[in-house]
Every structure is written in structure tokens, then in C-alpha cells.
Amino acid sequence: MGIAIAIAIANPRKQRMPNPFNQQIIEEFRANHGKVGGYFEGARLILLTTTGARTGNRHTTPLGYLPDGDGTILVIASAGGSPRNPDWYRNIGADPRVTVESGAFTYEADAVVLDGEERDRAFARAVESEPGWAEYQAKTDRTIPVVALREVPVAGPPNINAGSMGEPSRSSMTRSGANSP
């Protein structure tokens, strides 16, 4: 199941809010420390918050991801194979500093658009992990971008999304982006 959920309410005069489908996923994700049910149950999801390129408003989008080691995760700007890149992708072009919520942790990351052979190798790994990405690529004439989200190191303890340090993590992703056992 390739996952690329895009916010698609267009009214430049009002602050854009996630569509009802995305908003339900965002609320469920936050309430359950990164777990959601339904179609996305068991999927690797993050919440990606970007700064709007035109408005400067913060926008949160649920996205599928692929762990890529060393605190880096990959997200695919597929927009379900549409002819246009998703809004979050345009936003990172204007401001690559993003916020990632994994369920267990919230952290700042730098979004780096991969290109050339690096992009092609990363996309091939994504397709190997989730063949739906290839289906999205087949539906569009554009080359679907691959973005590396690289955690920004900070001093001090991580920002843990739990009621207490003793609360077990119910997230499917650790702070480093790898699957937990």
C-alpha cells in the first residue's frame, strides 16, 4: 500500500486546514502515539509539518516513510501519481526545516530532495519495500521526488510524546526512524 496523502483544500484567502480524511488520521495518530486503524493499520506513518511557501502557515500531512539509517527517513512525493507534486513538497522547497512526529518522538529535520542516481537508488529501495510506489510512478509523466528527512541534532533529551517516561512506546518507529521490535 503506497501511502502519499495530500492536503488538497485550495482557498488562498483562508488558512488551509487538512481535509477531513487527513484530519481524522492526524487526530488518531496523535491520540494513539503513532498508531492508526483502518486502511493504514500497520503502515509506517509519520506526521510531517511544513511551513507554507506562500502563507508561512504550518501545515501537517500524514505520510508513509521508509527508514534509511542514521536517523534518516525517506518520504516519496507521489501525490498518488497525480501530475502535480504535493503541497508539502513545494513547501520544503521554500523552507526545508520541517517537524516530524513519529508517534514516540517529535523532532526537527532538514528535508533534502534527492536527485540523479541517489534518487533512483532510494526510489528503487522504496519500491522494493512497497511496490505501490511504482504504480504511482506509472500513472504520471513527472519523476516522483524522493526526500530524505535528516534529523537535526539537539542538545538535551529528546521530545518524547508520552504521558511519562515509564509509559511504553506504542509507536512503530523509534527516534532513529527504524522499526521497533
Image (cartoon, helix red, strand yellow):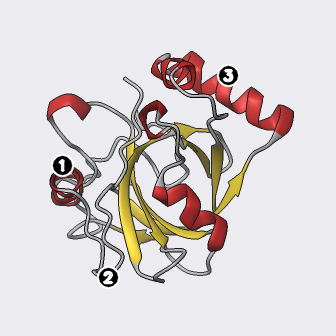
Quadrant position of residue 7: bottom left
Nearer to the camera, 66 or 81: 81
Q: Position of residue 57 (x, y in %)?
A: 41, 81
Residue kind at label 1, given as amino acid type: Phe
Q: Position of residue 152 (x, y in %)?
A: 64, 69
Q: Earlier in the sequence, mark 2 or mark 3?
A: 2
Say which of marks 2 and 1 sits in front.
2
Residue 152 seen in render: no
Q: Earlier in the sequence, mark 1 or mark 3?
A: 1
Residue displayed at 62% across by 28% down: 141
Residue displayed at 60% across by 64% down: 92
Q: Is residue 149 above or below residue 138?
A: below
Residue 54 seen in render: yes
The residue wearing badge 3 is: 124
Residue kind at label 3, given as amino acid type: Ala
Residue 13: assigned label: 2
Q: Secondary structure at mark 3?
A: helix
The residue wearing badge 1 is: 21
Q: How many marks?
A: 3
